[in-house]
Amino acid sequence: MKHGFRVMDSDLHTMEPDTLWERYLDDPFRAFAPTFVRRSDNASNQPTIRIGHLEIGEMAKRPQTAVVGKDLERRAFARHPHYEVAHARGYDPASHLAAMDIEGIDVAIIYGTRGRQVLMHDDLEPQVAAALARAHNNWTRDFCASNPDRLKFAAQVAFHDVGLAVREAQRAVRELGAVAVIGNPNPVRGRHIHDPELEPLWAAIEELGVPVGFHPTGQSSLRDDIARRYLDHPNGRVIGAAGRNPMELMLAFASFAAGGVLERHPRLRCAFLEGTCGWLPWWLWRLDEAWEKFGPGSEVQISQLPSQYFFRQCYVATDADEKVLKQVVEAVGDDTIVVSTDYPHSDGLFPRAIEEFVALEGVSDKTKAKILWDNCARLYNLTGVGGRADATFSGRAPKNDSGASR
């Protein structure tokens, strides 16, 4: 807890070991285990990823953007000694639980880091992409098993083949206990998320009764990624980082609402994560205005305004220090907003993310309580989950024998 508030983090990340896929891939796919390449000018946690002949990690491959990431990591590590401990431990479950205790987080929904990154290439063979996702979900299930009351996870699926994505979503939820399925807001292989080919996936997730959590990645290796247009331009990392996540999420919601997905799947819950929430009031107004002008003549018809689907089925995550939250709550209310810390990523606010959220001015304690716990518990169907359990953690950093954080 933090200052009397129960806290559920809607989007806390693992930093997976390099050896994950060597250990968890099914035998026929072991040859496709990703390898991680780190240069001296890279941040240690921002490697280039190689899968067969493909390379993933546009930011890590370019010296002018790699050095920005390295400087960001240096400043993050300087904020708190826990980073060094967690890094030396390979970001294992015990160090994650310790970080949650430092922040005051009772329960966290785990989203992968490299598990997302390894799938961010359009040219991955679909069977290989599905195997990478399957291995990651098995590993994450084992990671969360160290404290299943406090660690829940969202399942990775590969969007390269819809049938395989459906099968993995069903397996991850029914057999592994995943509480959500991760959605990729970008088009993969040219398919937007409201493309008719993806209908079986949304129908399956709706039937499973878990939400789809849309979450961008920072690799810029997909062909259709907003940050790609700035890769080789001055200060491109700054511009790309500022624009990508909110803009990709804005377009994802537009696809789901104006593209008819939420009309066809009224029981499907959606979350738009790690892209701030300040854009929401304006974007809902803009989409409604566009629908009133262009919707009547469009080929796919919906029965409500786009904004109405958001309030019926969707949630958005605020950054812990988002100063415009007061205005967002005034415009759209406080029933559909959750919060995330983004630990252990260097651009997060650890160890003061929840502290900063609690200190936000102009937001009532009642609203903060809803955002810190109630809304997130409702999103992930965890309303019966209790508070924080004690974690065992020595604080000592063992030798790194897995190569996870080198």
Image (cartoon, rainbow, N blue to C red):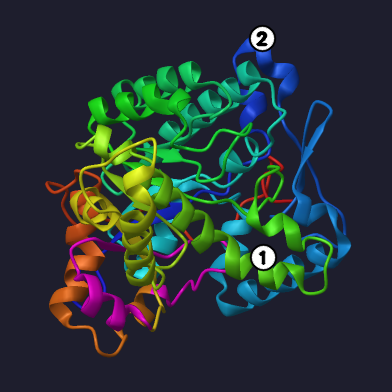
Taking depth in this image into account, of 182 and 12 the one nearest to the observer is 182
Residue 316 is drawn in which quadrant?
A: bottom left
Q: Amino acid at mark 1?
A: Gly
Work out which quarter of the rendered image holds the N terminus and state it.
bottom left
**Residue 337 in magenta stretch:** yes
Give x and y (percent) for residue 238: 69, 72
Give x and y (percent) for residue 71: 74, 73
Looking at marks 2 and 1 on the same chain, the residue that comes earlier in the sequence is marked by: 2
Q: Is residue 10 above or below residue 36?
A: below
Q: Is residue 119 above or below residue 353?
A: above
Disc 2 residue crowd, few under 14, some 14–19, many 20+, Cα 10 Å: few
- The residue drawn where x is 61% and y is 73% is 76
Q: Is residue 72 above or below residue 294?
A: below
What is the magenta range?
A: 324-353
- The residue drawn where x is 59% and y is 60% is 244
Taking depth in this image into account, of 1 and 366 the one nearest to the observer is 366
Give x and y (percent) for residue 166: 41, 21
Taking depth in this image into account, of 33 and 3 the one nearest to the observer is 33
Q: Amino acid at mark 2?
A: Pro
- The residue drawn where x is 27% and y is 41% is 302
Residue 394 left/right relative to 406: left
Residue 36 left/right relative to 26: right
Q: What residue is disc 2 on?
A: 28
Q: Is residue 136 above or below residue 162?
A: below
Q: Is residue 345 visible?
A: yes
Q: What residue is disc 1 on?
A: 240
Residue 84 is drawn in which quadrant?
A: bottom right
